[in-house]
Amino acid sequence: MRSVIRRRVTTMISAFLLQSPPLSSISPKHHQYSLLPLTTQRFLTASHSFRLRTFSTRSIPNMQDSASVSYLSQREAAEIDETLMGPLGFSVDQLMELAGLSVATSVAEVYKPSEYSRVLAICGPGNNGGDGLVAARHLHHFGYKPSICYPKRTSKPLYTGLVTQLESLSVPFVSVDDLPEDLSKDFDVIIDAIFGFSFHGAPRPPFDDIIRRLQTLQKRPVIVSVDIPSGWHVEEGDHEGGGIKPDMLVSLTAPKLCAKSFSGPHHFLGGRFVPPSVAEKYKLELPSYPGTSMCVRIGKPPKVDISAMRVNYVSPELLEDQVESDPVLQFRKWFDEAVAAGLRETNAMALSTTSKDRKPSSRMVLLKGFDENGFVWFTNYESKKGSDLSENPFAALLFYWEDMNRQVRIEGPVERISEEESENYYHSRPRGSQIGAIVSKQSSVVPGRHVLYDEYEELTKKYSDGSVIPKPKNWGGFRLKPNLFEFWQGQPSRLHDRYLFTYIAVSWRPVRLQYSLQEGNPAWIIRRLAP
Ligand SMILES: NC(=O)C1=CN([C@@H]2O[C@H](COP(=O)(O)OP(=O)(O)OC[C@H]3O[C@@H](n4cnc5c(N)ncnc54)[C@H](OP(=O)(O)O)[C@@H]3O)[C@@H](O)[C@H]2O)[C@@H](O)CC1
Ligand SMILES: Cc1cc2nc3c(=O)[nH]c(=O)nc-3n(C[C@H](O)[C@H](O)[C@H](O)COP(=O)(O)O)c2cc1C
Ligand SMILES: Cc1ncc(COP(=O)(O)O)c(C=O)c1O
Ligand SMILES: [K+]
């Protein structure tokens, strides 16, 4: 019996894969690179693009060129829906869970709970409404305070279950009559989960009135539409004008044709469940999703008012008795925490140097080790920074661990490390990087990339037998011996915690300190600085 069912399912899947012509997808533009990930294709074809690396586990949304994404008609959307839930074995609960999670993660990418905590999900009678219920549950767990307006409930167990789950989290349900006239007073975000791709005709009560209110609000919360801005024609968009103008659209599976006329600042796609067979069959060009993210930004990068860009840092307080008396220990503690938090390139630091004419310059380098003797990085001694450091052997290092609202400044004299240490580190590097260091006369002018590549190829051949690649004399490490540290922890209203550690020769003791010397490390004086 089981094998008969299995055979039937297999036949259905094969039939699905063979049948039906490509639908309204836009044909791929970059055939020659089609085996490469989309981000790589863009790097190779678009001159303005600069990201070759695909992102790692951090959830950074990619910017995708809207022209390279396919759009679905209403019929196609319904057909894919049926296919997923038929031969491909998905259940409606599953798809709804994935859709709702994608909506919640998209909202969280743009509207942080610290500023946009009060969410109202307005849920319609169909699956779009179900997506809204699921999204609200996830947003609750992400730290938002959702409320639900769900005027036309269905008695199907899937929906009653979703309602029970929300009720068990004490998420309030509000009736249409109880919604405040001015929604912006009570809500920061409205999730429009009223109608999805099965919408047709003109909205009927009570949704007609709700949509009208969303259209005409003067001062309003941000509106996030799930799959279709409610009231818009699924293919033609807001063709009669006067429809709601969402700030964010989260398309599901693939954008529907109406999304072409979405002009709001944030267009996301949540469809990290579409099997390749569906994408292939419908010739869907879909963006790659970054890291482990359930959503990806598509469409044009948002226009921003730079002067209004700011983050209100919220962190645990850092009090006097919480900082280590030894700054190297304190640094290690923060460094380890940043590594544990999964930050990318925790060891990347800005290095500032000055030349003999006292002009400063900064660049990033990688920290390759630290202890009580100092902080080490490697470079070309004949580079700009190398010559600065021979003219003025003092430097400043800066770490910024954005996700942790932390900054560390370190200053002090710099010296070259021993040849032996440099040799050891150089030979621990990948062979390609060793050859790269020979090829690059760092900071000198090069006529073109081919010059670097030609020499690289030549040396790669030369050392293809695995023999030792000699370290160039002018390549090696520097060590900065700190005489100053500052640990900065961002706090609300710009009232940050700052601790300055200065190294004082033991023979000298300042009389009045704002923060006393601590035992065990008498040479370091710690003072809190005003933010
Ligand atoms: N891969 C996928 O496919 C996935 C799909 N997913 C989600 O499913 C959504 C599609 O769901 P859906 O088919 O249930 O349709 P949807 O638009 O929510 O509502 C239909 C309801 O609205 C009603 N209604 C219609 N017009 C009306 C009007 N003018 N005025 C008033 N009522 C009107 C209609 O009633 P009827 O007209 O039939 O009487 C019916 O009750 C899709 O957009 C996405 O969000 C995701 O969960 C996962 C992946
Ligand atoms: C994250 C990051 C890490 C880097 N690490 C190093 C490094 O460890 N050593 C190095 O020589 N250049 C490194 N670079 C390149 C430098 O920033 C810089 O371009 C190069 O060293 C030349 O700088 P200069 O002309 O000021 O000497 C890094 C760049 C980035 C973005
Ligand atoms: C030119 C250059 N040299 C050295 C480094 C240090 O890194 P690694 O020694 O890990 O290759 C970097 C890192 O980006 C670099 O760009
Ligand atoms: K919607």
Image: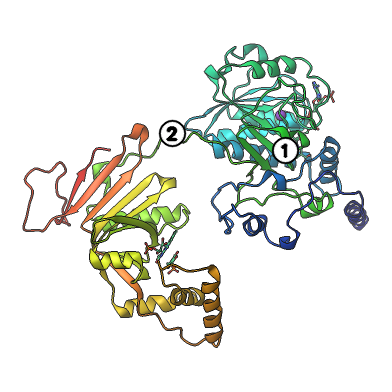
Q: Residue furthest front?
A: 447
Which quadrant is home to the N terminus? bottom right
- Quadrant of the rendered image containing residue 182: top right
* Residue 414 appears in view: no
Do the CB atoms of the residues marked 1 and 2 lie less than 8 Å apart?
no
The x, y position of residue 489, in whole percent, is 33, 43
The x, y position of residue 491, in whole percent, is 35, 37
Residue closer to the observer: 280 or 461: 461
The residue type indicated by label 1 comes to Met
The x, y position of residue 510, in whole percent, is 8, 48
Which residue corresponds to the image point at 54% horizontal and 82% vertical from the top-left? 458
Taking 528 as reference, is 203 left or right? right
Q: State ligand 2's quadrant.
A: bottom left
**What kind of element bears circle 2?**
helix
Taking 201 as reference, is 216 left or right? left
Marks 1/2: CA distance? 39 Å
Label total for image: 2
Is the residue at mark 2 in contact range of ligand 2, meaning its CB lies under 8 Å from it?
Answer: no
- Quadrant of the rendered image containing residue 210: top right
Which quadrant is home to the C terminus? top left
As drawn, the label of residue 307 is: 2
Is the residue at mark 1 in contact range of ligand 1, meaning its CB lies under 8 Å from it?
Answer: yes
As drawn, the label of residue 96 is: 1
Check disc 1: other Cα within 10 Å, few if <14, some if 14-19, many if 20+: many
Label 1 or label 2, whichever comes before in sequence order: 1
**What kind of element bears circle 1?**
helix
The image shows residue 280, relative to residue 264, as above or below, that is below
The x, y position of residue 151, in whole percent, is 71, 19
Residue closer to the observer: 41 or 166: 41
Which residue corresponds to the image point at 27% horizontal and 49% vertical from the top-left? 486
